[in-house]
Amino acid sequence: MEILTLLGDGFATSLSPVNLMIVLLGVTAGLFIGAMPGLGSVNGVAIVLPLTFIVPPSSAIILLAAIYYGAMYGGAISSVLLGIPGASTAVATTFDGRPMAQQGKAGLALIAAAVASFVGGTISVILFTVFAVPLADLALAFGPAEEFALVLLAFTTFVGLGGDDVLKTIIMICLGLVLSSVGLDLISGQPRLIFFDQPGFYSGISFLVLAIGVYGVGEVLFTIETSHKRQQVTPARLSLRELVEGMKAMARLWKTMSVGSFLGFFVGMLPAAGATPASLMAYGIAKSTSKHPETFGKGNIEGVAAPETANNAASTGSLLPMLTLGIPGSPTTALLLGGMVMWGLVPGPMLFIEQPDFVWGLISSLYTANFAAVVINIALIPLFVWALRMPFTVLCTLVLVLCIVGGYAPSQKMHDVWLILGFGVVGYLLRKADYPLAPLVLALVLGPLMEKSFRQTLIAEQGNMFAFVERPLSGLFLAIAAFFFVLPLVNALRHRLANRKLAPDGLPPSGGAA
Amino acid sequence: MLAADRIIAIAIIAMSLYFMTHAATLPIGWSGETGGPGAGAFPFWLSLVMALSALGILARSFMKEPTHGRFFHDRAVRPVVAVTLALFCAIALMPLVGAYVALVLFMLWYLRIFGGHGWVLTSILTIATPVFLFFFFEVTLKILLPKGWTEPFFIPLYSKFF
């Protein structure tokens, strides 16, 4: 019952007129950002974050969470109408959403996506509310050793579950951690890695600079390269009859949607997994448990419902470890975490005790945002159809200008703007070469915590390296981390053995090293 | 594709070595005073891991059969280079002629020349954007954008809005 009281207090914050307006604004902006091909929640949050100084932190986080939420809804719009996912999280939605649109059922597909997103969002927000307090209580017992082990665990999930090239993943994690150590050393105060004696490096490399560079400039460059063709927008008509029909069809899919929600929530909590794999998994499960799996990929409404519930549930799921443990569950939440640090808050379990208004305001705003998103989404469908006709060049210009000004504003140094351009170009090249960018951003955000907790532990234990293993919780985390770390190796070996059995004439195993 | 993979791997190795020389100016081993690793240890050893991983990618690329995919396609990469150069010029101009001139020039180039849009759309956007930026950043947030030579023109505006 205590949770309900806290949640009630939260609603008092989030339902204040200002915050309600912020939710509506954020959700609408998020819907547009998500609907634009090439821009997803992470890009939206990166570009808008520097503008959040205008409101107090509790409103700023509500704005960003609403954008995050809206973008998850919006991703489906371009998946259905253009056939290209608005964000990687909506890839699975194209499988059946696009065929539905081609059969003239674009309106129905959009309704299905919106309703499924709402169900996924609602179930996961309830799960979030239930799990938040116990998890934060558990996290209160964490010392520096546990913090270090947990951060390490977060990184090893990228190696074990990320699905990207292992060596490239390791490089990106290390690069992010090294970049996070630029500036003054936390413990001795000595200046470190002051490249080319540039004074700008004394204050370190802000996560915002990296995020705007990689997810703003880099993303635009990538979009420019990949989308030189104009896309055909499928018109979507929406009648009241279709709305009713859509609701009826969705009601029959409650089983698919509940599976998608639970799956999405728990997969979303893992830093390396998140919304994209969750939606693909939900699609796979829906297809394999369906009585008519052959209709999937040809415009089955269930194939839209499953991934859309999962990706919305995953976005809420990824907020849980960020808020309770201080370990973000996705690149977008890593930016939210960085934003909280920027606003002067300390993420982690103490937040529940010291800033209950902030925490419960955010949690209750998720309920509001979820409700607002489904209503605005369905109401504004004609507007999205129109907006998707907007030429890329207009969008890219505005995004680039916002990147430059938004990158300059927080610290007011041209040094940061140059770094943004540099990170943008390098991020674009690395992405082309299949280097994963999410671990880089996460590492830069978590780097200071990781180094501090590591060195604090060793100082407290007089340099005893075994301190990390001797404490039960941190030992457990490290054991799981070790498991994730060797997982690709085990998989590669198994793959090779299986290949040898299949191909005794010594054909080289395909796929290379993991 | 393979050549690009190798060039990037070599670049990462070079960058790691550069990081390591920087980190090595600080204690990278066990520091006796504090009972923990020294200030340079964290960046030094991580850079080493980075260099070794990149070396692994380099070595692996020689064992793989060459693939035929190309990293850059001439037609697709030309606009990327153009936009990057335009951004570079705009940022370089910002401290000299001010954000308002540099960004407007950038938008003019992007919309009119690069994007081929009509004058109506171009002028609406190039006028509305700086006005929005001025009221959002300077008036509301009190964050002054660089003005360069155009500073004197803003003094009447400052006296009106501050």
Image (tube, helix red, strand yellow):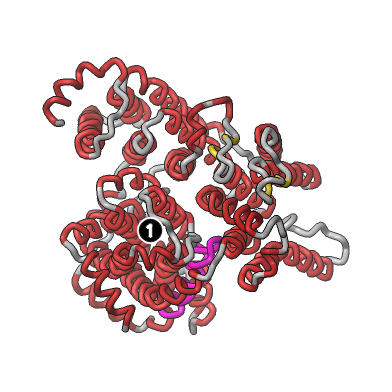
In the image, taking residue A7 as reference, residue A472 lies left or right, namely: right
Give coordinates of residue B32: x percent, y percent: 72, 46
Q: Nearer the viewer, residue B71 or A134?
A: A134
**Helix, strand or loop at mark 1:** helix
Which residue sits at x=39%, y=50%?
A339
Label 1: chain letter: A
Q: Tell me where residue A236 appears, x and y as whole percent.
A: 27, 60
In the image, A176: left or right of A40?
right
Q: Quadrant of residue A311?
A: bottom left
Residue furthest to the front in view is: B33
Q: Quadrant of the C terminus of chain A?
A: bottom right
Q: How many marks?
A: 1
Q: Is residue B70 left or right of residue A320?
A: right
Quarter holding the N terminus of chain A is bottom left
Q: Residue furthest right?
A: A505
Residue A209: percent from the left, percent from the top? 45, 40
Magenta stretch: give its range.
A257-279
